[in-house]
Image (tube, rainbow, N blue to C red):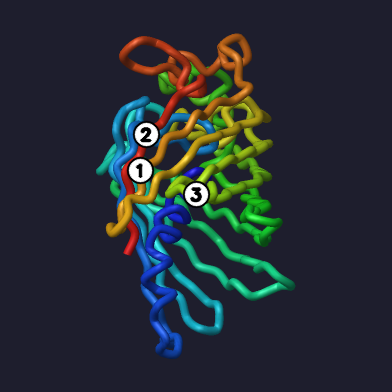
């Protein structure tokens, strides 16, 4: 869930101006971000065929802690479902203070506008955040109950390419556990960031030849840094991302799981660059 780190970094860059505002908080606030990334990685797996992606999000928050939002990105390769080749996430939840941190409970509805049928799915989540010294920490659990979009419809990538269903109508669930950490580097405009996640779910391919957890279970991780451009809402980022999905372990997913240009794994190591602006 690297996009949450990207948005958070952009909001941190905008924080000094907000801190100077002495007016009482508005009952409703609107925040957002836009970004250009060199590769859209979702839980360690490229959704843009290791190419550029344009992304943006908007969140409306009530002073009670209730919020709704939307986030979108273009797709290619593994994440192609036809239509506009776009992922649109609709988000709603409730965030409340808890001790020195916050508890966030909500749901993400993943949509692929105009794309193939049986692509959308819902994923409730719970996130607990807080601070430890100079570091901001977050632990999250996302569990998607059994749905057709997460089912194991194809046993192999070759079957998906031929269009021959192995188990049409199958429904599977999905679990994702993750932790994020960010920390400002003293006397610099840099923020260090790190992420680790564990996925457990469908070990095959869904009705559109993809899977949220491609090999059934795997780890993903990221480490990087963000640079806040002083006097602007811009944040420049760089991150190294990888998974423990081996080429041999994902062999049954081929050719679906390969970069279309050079055949490399779309879950292999990658350095991702980003430019984001928050408002």
Please name whichever residue, 40 or 224, is drawn nearer the observer in this view of the structure.
Answer: 224
Q: Nearer the viewer, mark 2 or mark 1?
A: 1
Nearer the N terminus, badge 2 or badge 3? 3
Nearer the N terminus, badge 3 or badge 1? 3
Name the residue carrying label 1.
236
In percent of width and height, residue 220 lies at 60, 32
Location of the C terminus (image quadrant): bottom left
Q: Residue at x 46, y 47 (%)?
A: 188
Image vertical order of residue 171 relative to residue 39, above or below: below
Q: Is residue 5 left or right of residue 26?
A: right
Please name whichever residue, 137 or 212, is drawn nearer the observer in this view of the structure.
Answer: 137
Determine the CA span between mark 2 and mark 1.
8 Å
Specify the label residue 273 is tagged with. Answer: 2
Nearer the N terminus, badge 2 or badge 1? 1
Q: Residue at x 63, y 14 (%)?
A: 249
Crowding near pointer 2: few (<14 within 10 Å), some, many (20+)?
some
Whether the residues at callouts 2 and 1 have beta carbons within 8 Å, the answer is yes
Specify the label residue 5 is tagged with. Answer: 3
Q: Is residue 154 left or right of residue 145?
A: left
């Amino acid at each position: 869930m690297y996009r949450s780190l990207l948005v958070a970094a952009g909001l941190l860059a905008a924080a000094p101006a907000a801190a100077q505002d002495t007016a009482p908080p508005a009952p409703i606030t609107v925040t957002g971000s836009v970004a250009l990334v060199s590769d859209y990685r979702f839980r360690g797996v490229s959704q843009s065929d290791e190419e550029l992606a344009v992304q943006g999000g908007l969140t409306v928050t009530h002073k009670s802690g209730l919020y709704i939002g939307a986030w979108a990105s273009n797709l290619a390769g593994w994440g192609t479902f036809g239509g506009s080749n776009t992922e649109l996430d609709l988000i709603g939840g409730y965030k409340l203070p808890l001790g020195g941190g916050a508890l966030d409970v909500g749901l993400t509805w993943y949509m692929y506008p105009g794309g193939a049928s049986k692509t959308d799915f819902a994923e409730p989540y719970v996130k607990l955040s807080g601070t430890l010294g100079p570091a901001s920490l977050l632990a999250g659990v996302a569990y998607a109950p059994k749905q057709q979009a997460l089912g194991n419809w194809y046993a192999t990538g070759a079957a998906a390419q031929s269009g021959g269903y192995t188990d049409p109508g199958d429904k599977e669930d999905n679990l994702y556990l993750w932790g994020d950490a960010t920390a400002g580097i003293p006397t610099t405009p840099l923020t260090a960031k790190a992420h680790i996640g564990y996925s457990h779910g469908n070990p095959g391919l869904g009705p559109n030849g993809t899977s949220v957890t491609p090999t059934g279970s795997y780890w993903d991780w990221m480490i990087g840094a963000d640079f806040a451009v002083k006097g602007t809402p811009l944040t420049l980022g760089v991150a190294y991302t990888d998974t423990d999905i081996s080429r041999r372990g994902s062999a049954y997913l081929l050719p679906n799981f390969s970069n279309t240009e050079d055949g490399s794994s779309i879950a292999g190591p990658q350095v991702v660059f980003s430019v984001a602006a928050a408002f």
